[in-house]
Amino acid sequence: MVVLGIETSCDETAAALVDDQRRILAHVVFSQDHASFGGVVPDIAARAHLQKLAPLVQAVLEKAPEAAAQLSAVAVTTGPGLIGSLWVGVSFAKALAWSLSCPLVQVNHLEGHALTVRLTHDVAFPYLALIASGGHCELALVRGVGDCLTLGQSLDDAAGEAFDKVARLLGFPYPGAKALEACAQAGDPQRFAFPRPLKGQPGCDFSFAGLKTAARTLLTQLPDLSETLRADFCASFQQAVAEVVLDRFQHAFESVRDQHPTACVLTGGVAANQRIRTELEAFAASCDLPFVAPPMELCTDNGAMIAWAGLERYRNNSYSTRNVFAFAPRPRWELQELSCA
């Protein structure tokens, strides 16, 4: 069984071929450059997808011609995401699936992230997953394909968004999360007392807007930001985010302990942050559970996660076979809304 996955939810144009032996047969990602704008511009992102998607998919199919000739289904990110970008991927996938007389599987972008560890590590259901990126921050108990129980989510900014916006305040180019983390390595995480929003409070929701505002306010009080102060600032901010994430994850685990999760999972772009990985890995060890995160190249948006989620849905018959080409992209699509339409 071979599935082609197409991903165009934001600013990565991506496609991949994955088979039911958990092999990534071909994998190509084109990352757009929005650094000069300080953030993703939706119209420019959609136009870039329009230019890059067809040759990128052709390149993927040419990398594994024998597998491409045995294509079982086409899977495409249908939401959530930027509506213009989603339309490019969905329209292309519809045309391709129709021309090949191939089943077309709609994939929720968040479920794609959540199921990636089943591709890379064959993690058994149910497992506790934190999906954290520039656009999303959500805790869920992944009980099966199309069966995710949302435990908490961001009430305002996502964790990755907070990293990127504070990095921009510091003058780092977009996306700035990596640069902020690199700068933090030489800093003192106790130098500045940033707030820890919702830490210790009931529930599993996140809030990073206040932390971001506190960072902006502090910067106005530091007119001479030396290299040492900058490193301490980054380290202190990163530590605050990590402690909030750990606290929310602990609350989520306690709420589902009786359902015996098999693993603690971190996925999405923020999974690349080593401080957060270290905190969650230590917590998982204290619970005698494995900590699992995808390889770095599969943490950010990619076609392999969409192909795998589509493969899981296809072999479980958990996808729509009625009016298969009549659906539209969904800029908002909660994990708990997953179902076979």
Image (cartoon, rainbow, N blue to C red):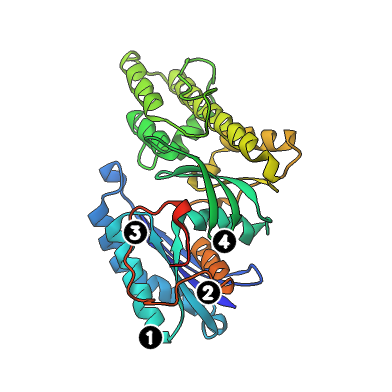
Q: Quadrant of residue 274?
A: top right
* Amino acid type shown at disc 2: Val
Q: CA distance from mark 3 to mark 2?
A: 22 Å
- Residue reaching furthest top? 221
Between 61 and 104, the residue placed more toward the observer is: 104
> Label 3 belongs to which residue?
330
Report the quarter where the N terminus lies. Answer: bottom right
What's the residue type where badge 1 is placed?
Ser
> Can residue 99 be seen by looking at this rendering?
yes
Q: Earlier in the sequence, mark 4 or mark 1?
A: 1
Instruction: Name which residue lies at 33% across and 13% down.
Output: 221
- Residue 139 lies, in percent from the top left, at 53, 42
Q: Quadrant of the C terminus?
A: bottom left
Relative placement, left or right, of 69 versus 42 is right
Choose mark 3 or mark 2, whichever is in front: 3
| Residue type at numbered disc 3 | Arg
Helix, strand or loop at mark 4 = loop
Mark 3: secondary structure = loop
| Residue located beneath label 2 in the image | 3
User: From the viewer's perspective, is the residue at label 2 or at label 4 nearer?
Assistant: 4
- The mark that comes first in sequence, 2 or 4, is 2
Disc 4 from disc 3: Cα separation: 19 Å
Q: Which disc is residue 99 wearing?
A: 1
Number of marks: 4
Q: CA distance from mark 2 to mark 4?
A: 16 Å
Q: Residue tagged by mark 4?
A: 145
Disc 2 to disc 1, how far (Cα)?
A: 15 Å
Q: Are marks 4 and 1 in contact (CB under 8 Å)?
A: no
Q: Which element is circle 2 on? A: strand
Q: Are the residues flagged by discs 3 and 1 in contact, CB closer than 8 Å? A: no
Choose between 332 and 97: the one closer to the eye: 332
Question: Is 261 situated left or right of 106 in this image?
Answer: right
